[in-house]
Amino acid sequence: SRFAALGARWQVTTAVDGEAGTPEYRMRFKNAAGAEISPWHDVSLFTGEEGVYNCIIEIPKNTKPKMEVAIKEPRNPIAQDIKKGKLRDYHGPIFWNYGMLPQTWEDPNVVHPHTKCAGDNDPVDVVEIGSASLATGSVEPVKVLGVLAMIDDGELDWKLIAIRTADPLAAELHDIADVEAKCPGVVTGIREWFRWYKTPDGKPLNAFGFDEVALPRAHAVEVVKETHEAWKKLMKGTTDKGKLWIN
């Protein structure tokens, strides 16, 4: 069942259509039987461990192409984002691995009571702060450590801060205060990178709710639970899917 927790690490394979750096490029996901699946809907969010979730890596650290799960395409393959007819690249590399949590959705029909902003219509984003560069399409169990409430063009766009459980530092990081203590400058770096990254395109600085504070692990886990519930409503048809592909 799509709604069942998973006790073991999720196993998928990927296959690529088209050339990297072209609009035709697609990375498709397959299950153990070789059938194509959706990384958004069919990979379980849950790992069986509290506060540890499966993360789909879209963008390896220190790279620029804006790869993302294509939420409006059948089976939701990973593709390079296109804006105004051109393949989208960041203006400088992102310094962390970047991905999304499957089976989550930031509902654009719901206004958050604190930020007064609605969701951005995407799965929840993950900034993975570990030492290794993680490949596009890899499914990594990550330990959630905190979350930033980014406001992008009036929409709420949560940025979960996490570390993959296999990272050597994971055993020492349990909450956002540990990140501040053992990885000084990382939280500030994430906040400022996402504040400024769209300005070369003439867009304004992004803002952050909750006085720009990175909220602790407990709040981050609540964000995951809330967005998972929103995804379940989307899948059950009780929320308008718009142009999203949900099978």
Image (cartoon, rainbow, N blue to C red):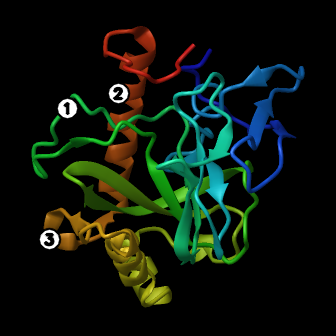
Q: Is residue 164 left or right of residue 180?
A: right
Secondary element at image label 3: helix
Q: Residue at x 83, y 49 (%)?
A: 19
Which mark, by number, is residue 110?
A: 1
Q: Quadrant of the C terminus?
A: top right
For this view, does 186 lie left or right of residue 134? left
CA–CA distance in space, label 3 to label 2: 25 Å
Mark 1 surroundings within 10 Å by alpha-carbon count, few (fewer than 14), some (14 through 19), many (20 or more): few
Residue drawn at the location 24% of the way across and 48% of the way down = 155
Q: Residues within 10 Å of mark 2 (few under 14, many from 20)?
A: many
Q: What residue lies at 10% left-to-right and 43% top-to-bottom? A: 113
Front one among 116 and 217: 116
- Residue 9 at least partly seen: no
Residue at the limit of the structure toward the front, as seen here: 85
- Of the numbered discs 3 and 1, the one sitting upstream in the chain is 1
Locate residue 94, reporting x and y percent: 56, 73
Q: In the rendered image, which residue does mark 2 sit on?
A: 230
- Looking at the image, tell me whether mark 3 or mark 2 is earlier in sequence order: 3
Q: State the SS at label 2.
A: helix
Name the residue furthest top.
237
Which quadrant holds the N terminus?
Answer: top right
Closer to us: 45 or 136: 136
- Crowding around mark 3 (Cα neighbors within 10 Å: few <14, some 14 to 19, many 20+) is few
Q: Decide: marks 2, 1 in contact (CB < 8 A)?
A: yes
At mark 1, the secondary structure is loop
Which amino acid does the dot numbered 3 rest on? Asp
Q: Position of residue 82 (x, y in %)?
A: 55, 48
At label 1, the amino acid type is Val
- Name the amino acid, label 2: Ala
